[in-house]
Amino acid sequence: MTIVVYGAGGIGCYVGGRLAATGSPVTFVGRQRMADELAEHGLRLTDYLGADLRVADVRYETSPGAAAEADLVLVTVKSAATASAADELAEVLKPGAIVVSFQNGVRNGELLRERLTEQVVVTGMVPFNVLNRGGGVFHQGTEGALDIQHHPGLAPYVDAFAKAGLPLTQHDDILPVQWAKLLLNLNNPINALSDLPLRDELSQRSYRRCLAAAQAETLELLDAGGITPAKLLPVPMHRFPAILRLPDFLFRRLAAKMLAIDPLARTSMWEDLEAGRTTEIDYLNGEVVRLAESLNRSAPVNAKLVALIRDAEVNRRPWSGPDLLRELQG
């Protein structure tokens, strides 16, 4: 059972690292910068529950050829790199290999499936946040198990993921799960623009009202498109905007029952802006804009968030909650 994590950044190093730390043979494939970091420091995985796992001997490669003998490939590249990753894997993967898309957005699995015609492509979803703390340390800051499209070929790996503390929740229809995760990820640009830890940002009603506006707009479009998002948390997604608009003291009481978030949690979009990288905004809020266009409608709140992140990629500045809310309402 050979597992390869392809595009091993934050999510890939965390998921693959927990598998490796609990005895699974894992090869990581990614950038030279990460290979150098892990060669120097090893790999350390922590989480909000107090887990602290280490992998001293990390096999981290930079060539696609390292995936040639893989039985299971976890694709964790950024969404914009999916097409090129698929082309690279098509050149080296053996027929019948199982390829799992553990990526943001809703279309990456389809793109991989189009190009990897001799392999089995399964769409998955990572619901929790992972913070790259540097020095080979990756921290899971929010709760959640791995969601994945049901496929019998996954059976040999179920125990390995469970042993790693990352049980696989399998679904016959993964699209509603993906849209539910995307609804939660609509907070990524708000968090990135706030320049605050996730828990601090969500503790302020003005930022939550921004997220409520983006979610309400999206839910209306999903209703029009006949898509019902899955229930990932104790509260149905259609009730989220109303909960987000509650006064702070009421929201804190409800949020404590819905989702565990520790003080270290940050979004990947904040990390991308911090590092000067292009974000995945086109595959999150931009996906809502595309859905609106397909329905001959508009999505002004999400379109504005796309524009603000595009500007922040060039000229970053923190937004206060009231200022951001006024901008979105305007």
Image (cartoon, rainbow, N blue to C red):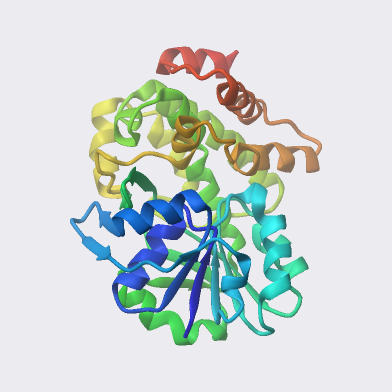
111 and 137: which one is in front?
A: 137
Q: How many marks?
A: 0
Q: Is residue 253 visible?
A: yes
Question: In the displayed structure, does residue 51 sit left or right of residue 7?
Answer: left
Compared to 15, does 120 lie above or below?
below
Q: Position of residue 135 (x, y in %)?
A: 31, 47
174 and 305: which one is in front?
A: 305
Residue at image x 55%, y 82%? 71
Compared to 94, does 4 lie above or below?
above
Compared to 24, does 115 lie above or below?
above
Residue at image x 45%, y 17%? 319
Q: Position of residue 263 (x, y in %)?
A: 24, 38
> Splitting the image into 4 quarters, where does residue 282 fall?
top right
Q: Is residue 110 visible?
A: no
Compared to 20, does 45 lie above or below?
above
Question: In the displayed structure, does residue 101 sit left or right of residue 207?
Answer: right
Q: Position of residue 191 (x, y in %)?
A: 43, 31
101 and 42: which one is in front?
A: 42
Q: Quadrant of the C terminus?
A: top right
Q: Position of residue 309 (x, y in %)?
A: 57, 27
Residue at image x 56%, y 79%? 70
> Splitting the image into 4 quarters, where does residue 99 fall?
bottom right
Residue at image x 55%, y 72%? 73
